[in-house]
Image (cartoon, helix red, strand yellow):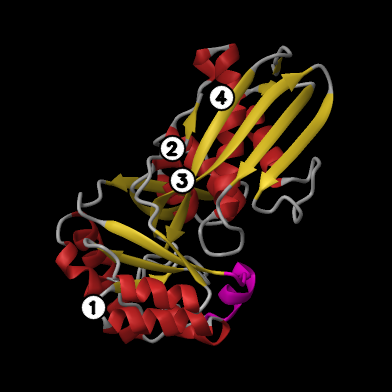
Amino acid sequence: MTRTLPAGLSVTARVPGSSANLGPGFDSLGMALGIYDEIEVRTTDSGLTIRVEGEGADDVPWGPSHLVVRAIERGLEAAGVWADGLDVVCRNVIPHSRGLGSSASAVVGGLAAGCGLAAKLDPALAIGSDQLVQLASEFEGHPDNAAASVLGGIVVSWTETAADAGNDGAVASDHGRVYRAVRLDPHPTLRPVVLIPEERSSTAHTRGLLPEVVPHGDAAFNVSRAALAVVALTQRPDLLLPATADRLHQTQRAPALPLTTHWIARLRAAGIAATVSGAGPTVLALGTSEFPAELRELAAIEGLRVVEPGLAKGVQVD
């Protein structure tokens, strides 16, 4: 039986952005970045009010179709509760359509807020991180960004069918998929830097550039580099340059991302492990030392905003 939340309950979810793929780990490796959106939700007697501040305030619908609102409602549903009214405030900092996981962060934050409201009513209704990864990934269709925003740090994620999952209590999506992730502790010296262009990129467009079939040699190359990336990111950062090499998606997306591709080549030639962040156009650079001042100045001249966000913990709800 669904329980109705009383008016006056409130929560705040603080959710980090993310970078996916990290080079060779297509749809499987992710990293939580210290760029945060904040979502405040309060239950009311009736209706819906939503306010959006910051990134995307002029671009997204302010109503029931808003992604955060849909995620809040899904979180309430998963916890077995409902609210007659909601007041929602979104304070957005994560750039939209730049490959920094803004949509996954919106989903994770909304779900966490909805579940957090349920837990305010009854702590027994709180859901765990595994279920939150599953719910968020159902929105996204793959778990890399969502899992990073849920768990923080570095994540390895994968997808199973319901049959693969066995009898461990996991609940599959309507499409029969079970989304999984584990968190890795990053090496303490690891320093992510993102170079963010002004232009935006469509994930659907850049994903559409990828071939249906890849050569066996390229697949084997990426398997070895993705395995090496786990070692480099957690134990051997001196191996980051070879560990971030890729043959499955970056070259194929290059025609749609000329500035991004140029900067990845420039940074890698300078010995800095650089990749496309998610579907782009942001460039992710991974190292252990200060980002070179001359490259920072040159990036600014060419229209790139250089940010050193640090690695982040997962979503927090108060």
Vertical position of residue 309 compared to residue 170: above or below: below
What residue is shown with label 3? 149
What residue is shown with label 4? 116
How crowded is the residue under tag 3: few (<14 C-alpha within 10 Å), some, or many (20+)? many
Q: Nearer the viewer, residue 110 or 139?
A: 110
Q: Nearer the viewer, mark 2 or mark 4?
A: 4
Q: Which of marks 3 and 1 is in front?
A: 1
Please give the name of the residue rendered at 79% of the width and 49% of the height, measured from the top-left corner: 61
What residue is shown with label 2? 130
How crowded is the residue under tag 4: few (<14 C-alpha within 10 Å), some, or many (20+)? many
Identify the amino acid type marked 4: Gly
What residue is shown with label 1? 271
Please give the name of the residue rendered at 41% of the width and 46% of the height, measured from the top-left corner: 165
Q: Which of marks 2 and 4 is nearer the N terminus?
A: 4
Q: Is mark 3 on a helix, strand or loop?
A: helix
Q: Which of marks 1 and 4 is nearer the N terminus?
A: 4
How crowded is the residue under tag 1: few (<14 C-alpha within 10 Å), some, or many (20+)? few
Determine the CA span between mark 1 and mark 4: 44 Å
